[in-house]
Amino acid sequence: MNKKMTINSIQKTKGERPLVMITAYDALFAKLFENSVDMILVGDSLNMSFAGRKDTLSANMEQMIYHTNAVCNGAKNSFVVCDMPFGTYTNKEDALTNAIKVFQTTNADCIKIEGGADKAYIVEHLVTNGIAVCGHIGLLPQSVRGEGGYKVKGRTAKEQQSLIEDARAIEEAGAFCMVIEGVIAELASEIASCVNIPVIGIGAGNGVDGQVLVFSDMLGLFEEFTPKFVKKYIDGASIVKDAIKTYSDEVKSREFPEEIHTY
Ligand code: KIV
């Protein structure tokens, strides 16, 4: 069994080795992932791949707490990150109240919030009050409706400058690490070298301090769409569908249950 990571051991990986993060939403998968990853993210992406919604925006605190508890139950030896859902950290008071709720009702090791320099004062307020914070800059899925779609960031000089400022502001505010999503690889790599905390990429190339993927994407279970940055390690959807079809056929033909499955 791997030794459970802490915010300190996570920070020490910077410059030493890439961090591995994966999402999980339940105990079953969390337990399967636990020994191969450094951190498990209970992402609000669960609103899409678990709850079947069109984006992450309708995820709420109750849902995030429920799933975080399930993941913590399944992966007791893992560093667990709970994503703060849309609208729960629009000011520092609400952010702290909601983050405290996560810490008091789950065993999550930190929370994650989306935003750059504009959210630095919130990160600082949380950290000052004992909440470990993972930042999230670049493409912010919670801004999808506000921005009219998912847009890769860092194509213009203005965006490049503001992303570097975002990363520095989040570090200065006290976040112990950050996710960087949907950013041109060269810029993401430059950002990782501008800060002293680990920068974990998703759709941000190979020059950052670690990688995170949504498990249902990389296992090929989510069929709605596949972003360019996703590598499907197995075709999970076909494997599951074939197994269910075989089960169904065997029940209908009375091939299942056999003698060995019978009391
Ligand atoms: O919600 C999520 O799964 C995330 C990842 C995309 C980083 O925030």
Image (cartoon, rainbow, N blue to C red):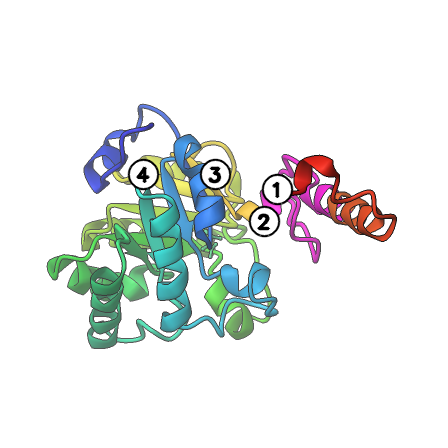
- Which of the two labelled residues, at mark 1 and mark 4, occupies the earlier sequence position? 4
The spot of residue 250 in percent (x, y) is 82, 46
**What is the spatial separation of the Cα atoms under label 1 and label 2, in whole angstroms?**
5 Å
Q: Is residue 162 visible in the rendered structure shown here?
A: no
Determine which residue is flagged by label 4: 198
The quarter of the picture where the N terminus appears is top left
The spot of residue 192 in percent (x, y) is 36, 38
Check whether the beta carbons of the residues at disc 4 and disc 2 lie within 8 A of each other.
no
**What is the spatial separation of the Cα atoms under label 4 and label 2, in whole angstroms?**
24 Å
Q: Quadrant of residue 122?
A: bottom left
Determine which residue is flagged by label 2: 216
Q: Is residue 35 visible in the rendered structure shown here?
A: yes
Residue 169, compared with residue 59, is above or below; it is above
The spot of residue 64 in percent (x, y) is 39, 65
Which residue is farthest front?
263
In this orientation, which residue lies closer to the viewer: 32 or 169? 32
**In terms of secondary structure, where does tag 2 sit?**
helix
> Disc 2 marks which amino acid?
Ser
Q: Please check the rendered image and state whether residue 193 is part of the magenta-colored stretch, yes or no.
A: no
Region rendered in magenta? 216-241
